Amino acid sequence: MLKEEKIFKREDGTQYKIVATINVNTYRDEVQWLTSVYYREKGKIKWLNLPSDVFYRHLRSMSFEEKIEYNRELALKYVTKEEINSVLLLLWEKIKPSV
């Protein structure tokens, strides 16, 4: 597993940390790209998960694909696609084959 992260600061002092990971499962011949977004309010130390407007019970009833889509839409309420892509690009730079 490889991981890359980057912190983005907003005008109000809130910080958002985007974490991109890649898991390579050679046993199953799979590659998984995952992104997670956390936030920290101005003056605070602890990173928190993004606030969700869906009850836990409803999340449990979602399919895996629905959960991925919900998390993607939730993240885009707080960070931009360009910010997410910049972190994914940093991770790609770590693993890209050199020619």
Image (spheres, rainbow, N blue to C red):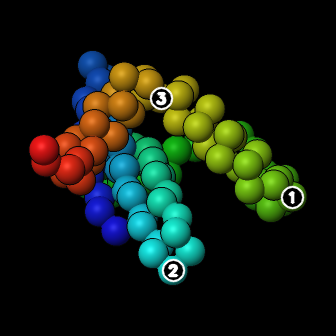
Looking at the image, tell me whether mark 3 or mark 2 is earlier in sequence order: 2
Residue labelled with disc 3? 78
- Looking at the rendered structure, the kind of residue marked 2 is Tyr
Residue labelled with disc 2? 27
Residue labelled with disc 1? 61
Tell me whether the residue at label 3 lies in contact with that at label 1, contact meaning CB atoms closer than 8 angstroms. Answer: no
Give me the residue at 47% from left, 52% from top: 34
- Regarding residue 41, the answer to whether it shows in the image is no
In the image, residue 38 lies at what x, y percent?
Answer: 41, 47
- Looking at the rendered structure, the kind of residue marked 3 is Tyr
**Nearer to us in this view, 56 or 30:** 30
Mark 3: few/some/many CA within 10 Å (<14, 14-19, 20+): few
- Which circle, 2 or 1, is nearer the viewer? 2
Q: Disc 3 versus disc 2: distance between alpha carbons?
A: 36 Å
What is the residue that sits farthest to the left in this orientation?
A: 99
- Please identify the quadrant where the C terminus is shown: top left
Q: Is residue 30 left or right of residue 6?
A: right
Q: Is residue 50 above or below residue 56?
A: above
SS at badge 3: loop
SS at badge 1: helix
Q: Quadrant of residue 77?
A: top right
Q: Disc 3 versus disc 1: distance between alpha carbons?
A: 25 Å
